[in-house]
Amino acid sequence: METEKGVEADKSQKDISPAGSPERVDEDEASAGRKLFAWLWSRHLIAAAVIFFSVFGVFYLANFAHFNFDDHELIVNNPTIRDFRNLGVVLQSGRPARAFSYMVDYALFELDPRGYHVHNLVWHTFASLLLYAFVVRLTRNVRLALMASFLFAIHPVHVEAVMSIAHRKEMMALSFLLLAFHAYLFQDKRPLLAPAVAFVFFVLAILSKQVTAVFPLLLLFHEFLRKGRGVSWKGLVYIALLLTLALSALYLGSRFSIPVLRDFNIFGRLKGAMIEELDFGRNLATAFSYYPRYLRFLLFPVHQSPVPKIEFTSFGRPWPWLGMATFISLPLAAFALRKNYVLSFSVGWIFINLLPVMNWIPQNSFFAERYLYIPSAGFCILLAAGWDEIYKNGEAISAKTHALSLCIITYLVVFAVLLGPLALRINVLWPRGGPYLMERSMALLISTLLVSIPFSLLFIMASAGKWPRPLIRRVWLELPVFFIVIGLGLILAAIMTEWLANGRLGAPLVESAGYLERYHSFIRAHARPGPRAGSSLLMASGTPLAEWGNALFYSFSGAALYLLFFVRMVRWASSYGLGRSFYWMTFLSVTLYMLSFNVARVGDWSNEIKLWSSVVAEDPDSLIGWNNLGKAYMDRKRFGPASEAFKEATRLAPERADAHGNLAVALLGNKDLDGAAASFARAAELNPADASSRMNLANLMVLKADSGKDPQGYVKAVDLYMEVLRIERRSAHALYNMAYCHYNMGALDLARSEAHRSLLIHPGFDKARLLLEKIDAAERASKTK
């Protein structure tokens, strides 16, 4: 028996082949695991590269932008960010995370705006990458995550947030919010560490922008979708703690004057009687009436003014009710889609993140594009998820639907790539002010629409594979054909536009010489002084032939490359099914649409004068528009146009002291001393606490006294400097100026005392030291006499 067992044992050993040995199995599994890991990370790296180049490619004009809008108050005129010894003061301010980032910027770039704008792009890229990782964690679908993050990276509704340094808070808030959510999703593996890290990132998020206080609601909704209606007690307690923190911040900010919680004071802009006089019903009706605009801008983010004109309404009109119906429909849709986690969560994300920006109690604007930065992440996930369903369920697309979609989408793409290059050169081809038979932009639109019809048929045939086989097989042959076809389309569109606009059949007469002179004159007039004065000098060629060469090389070839990519992707995807083809058609057309809007809007935000000129053109009664237009001209030392802009601001708000003060500074730069003095006096009259206007008015009186125009100027100036010191007791400049006046009046003892007091406050005040030397010399001279 033992022998038989031994024989059986030997046989069993011989039956095991070397390839199936346990050691070899372990090695194969390890090798497969390494290959899978490398494959996944290669996809992630490709996704990261796509996001990075998308952001920096779309927003490259940020390199030519300057400080704009609130950037001057927060950065240029903010001395606290210039020294890390002021860190305590910065951390006690509202939104301290953003303020600390400005300190880092100033340490690296001082006041060069390029570094600040690049920092903004870094935050936007970081937020886009975090969104990609977040969607991968939630769905395990790399394709869906890449599409969602790519759409988020290029969405035109983000232009205001990305191009304005002051709105960096939007990108920082979303980044920390996503980091907190990422940390929370690790709670199963790290039950103690993950909630603690999530709590830290949540605090950083609300210190970037208070709207992220809705994070506990997002977690609650996530748990509801993941576990049905039941939520674990552990998760519920943690969410309750975060919700308590958010509510405590709101309570403390509204109850007490805590600097770090200043932005949580929802009644901060309402004073006493204003709360009693506020019509909450009218305010709520206005908030609901603008709610659909948020959803419209997620879909169609056309040009939007940075300061949109808001019209108050009431529930007696239909728009608030339409907004309320839209408001209610979002949570209902999220609930109806609850079996599909991605769709339901993305709709819920939009709804929850729009809650704090609806201006329930008036403290901000009822609508602003930057408010959509965080909610748009949910929209991008929703759109990508819808595309992904089409990708996976291609059999749902019929052949007729696919063919009709191909015709419509190809026509729109061809129209866009023909219109874009000509629209960019409309001022060269058809200069403003010509005796045109038809308005030039309308002529261009009509001609491009008509020319696009026959040319789109060619590209439909190319997309469907009905194209000569050598061209289909060889991209280096197909590209020149696309180049020629696009070139012919653009030439025909230009000829037709010339016929509609001028009644002349032929190519437009390129007026490049005059255009270039006007362009360079504009740059010289608008360039800021300093190291960035010539950064926007994008020199053109100078001759009609070279101008057409530029159009051919840059515009025609770019359009041809895009169409080649579009046709080849549709052709490739069609071989895998109609669903994939439809997926790529719609994705590429939406991408082109978003990129087109981005180019136009980034261009607006990169030029302050153009931006604020468009604001006041759309709304001539925009106080903020005229004020910021004046500041933009002032920053370029163009005091004449600045004075005109500030005059409009004082006309719109004659009771605003700051408007009169700005006008006075512009008039002073324009050498209108009497006008400046009158405006400074008016500003001081309107605001008893305005030390700056009093100081400047006194300085003007000193100038008149120095020139001999007003012998009593020193006496009047001293009285005003005394008023300044009553407002700002430690004003070294006011003390020095008083000392200067007394020195010129012969009161040397008073002059010495005031100069010494000035140096006690500001020991490095060289002018005060020089004045003391003059006083000593004057006393010695009087003694020798």
Image (spheres, rainbow, N blue to C red):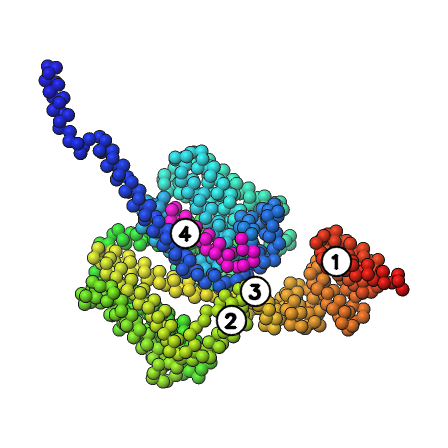
Q: Which residue is mark 4?
A: 128
Of residues 264 and 701, the one nearer the viewer is: 701
Residue count near mark 4 (Cα–Cα under 10 Å), binned few <14, some 14–19, many ≥20: many
Name the residue type under label 1.
Answer: Ala
Give the left or right position of residue 756, taking residue 375 as reference: right
Foreground mark, 1 or 4?
Answer: 1
Earlier in the chain: of badge 3 and badge 4, it is: 4
Are dots 1 and 2 in contact, CB under 8 Å? no
Residue 486 seen from this side: yes
Question: How far separated are the C-alphas under marks 1 and 4?
Answer: 53 Å
Of residues 308 and 726, the one nearer the viewer is: 726
Are dots 4 and 2 in contact, CB under 8 Å? no
Name the residue type under label 3.
Answer: Gly
Question: How far separated are the C-alphas under marks 3 and 4?
Answer: 34 Å
Give the left or right position of residue 505, taking residue 309 as reference: left
- Residue 298: % across, % down: 41, 58
Report which quarter residue 227 is drawn in: top left
Q: Which residue is mark 2?
A: 523
Name the residue type under label 4.
Answer: Ser
| In this view, 516 is above or below 377 | below
